[in-house]
Image (cartoon, grey):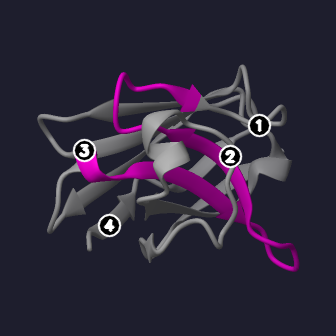
């Protein structure tokens, strides 16, 4: 069991950058893989990144690779999502989530909302054109 707090969202212009933070408490990241998901109004929640608990291996879907970077700071028990070259279509509520799935914990890979048991409250990202 881990509690997650997502923060760092805001309003930015297209082409700008944001860094989202996911602070964990109640447990340490060595037990979990952490994923970032986003959900735009009227759309299903989709994964944008995952980071493993060991060796900081990462996964990014094609839609985010090259623009989004997930990283981990074990000293702060925090996972980040650096978002660059933002587009209006990136506008969404962004959530971080934790999973104990062995495959993801050992080596980050694609998951789903059903893979993750613990979720943060989400932080809003709005990208203007």
Q: Is residue 23 above or below residue 2?
A: above
The local crowd at label 3, few if under 14, some if 14 to 19, many if 20 or more residues have their Cα within 10 Å, is some
Report x, y in % for residue 59.
63, 32
- The answer to whether residue 104 is left or right of residue 113 is left
Sequence-first tag of 4 and 3: 4
- Whole-angstrom CA distance, mark 4 to mark 3, is 14 Å
- What quarter of the picture does the C terminus occupy? top right
Mark 3 = which residue?
A: 30
Q: Is residue 94 above or below residue 69?
A: below
- Whole-angstrom CA distance, mark 2 to mark 4, is 17 Å
Q: Tell whether label 2 touches label 1 (CB within 8 Å).
A: yes
Mark 2 = which residue?
A: 48
Observer-nearest residue: 65 or 126? Answer: 65
The local crowd at label 1, few if under 14, some if 14 to 19, many if 20 or more residues have their Cα within 10 Å, is some
Q: Secondary structure at mark 4?
A: strand
Observer-nearest residue: 86 or 67? Answer: 67
Nearest to the eye among marks 1 and 3: give it.
3
Mark 4 = which residue?
A: 4
Q: Is residue 108 covered in magenta? A: no
Q: Tell whether label 3 touches label 4 (CB within 8 Å).
A: no
Q: Is residue 46 covered in magenta? A: yes
Task: Residue at 74% x, 57% y: name it.
Answer: 91
Mark identifier at residue 61: 1
Q: Secondary structure at mark 3?
A: helix
- Whole-angstrom CA distance, mark 1 to mark 2, is 6 Å
Report x, y in % for residue 109.
64, 39
């Amino acid at each position: 069991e881990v509690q997650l707090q997502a923060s760092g969202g805001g309003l930015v212009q297209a082409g700008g950058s944001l860094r989202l933070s996911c602070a964990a408490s109640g447990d340490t990241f060595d037990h979990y893989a952490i994923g970032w998901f986003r959900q735009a109004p009227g759309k299903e929640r989709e994964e944008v990144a995952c980071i493993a608990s060991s060796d900081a291996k990462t996964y990014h879907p094609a839609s985010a690779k090259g623009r989004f970077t997930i990283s981990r700071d074990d000293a702060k028990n925090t996972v980040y999502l650096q978002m660059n070259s933002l587009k209006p279509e990136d506008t969404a509520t962004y959530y971080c989530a934790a999973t104990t799935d062995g495959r993801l914990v050992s080596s980050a890979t694609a998951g789903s909302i059903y893979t993750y048991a613990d979720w943060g409250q989400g932080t809003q990202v709005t990208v203007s054109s």
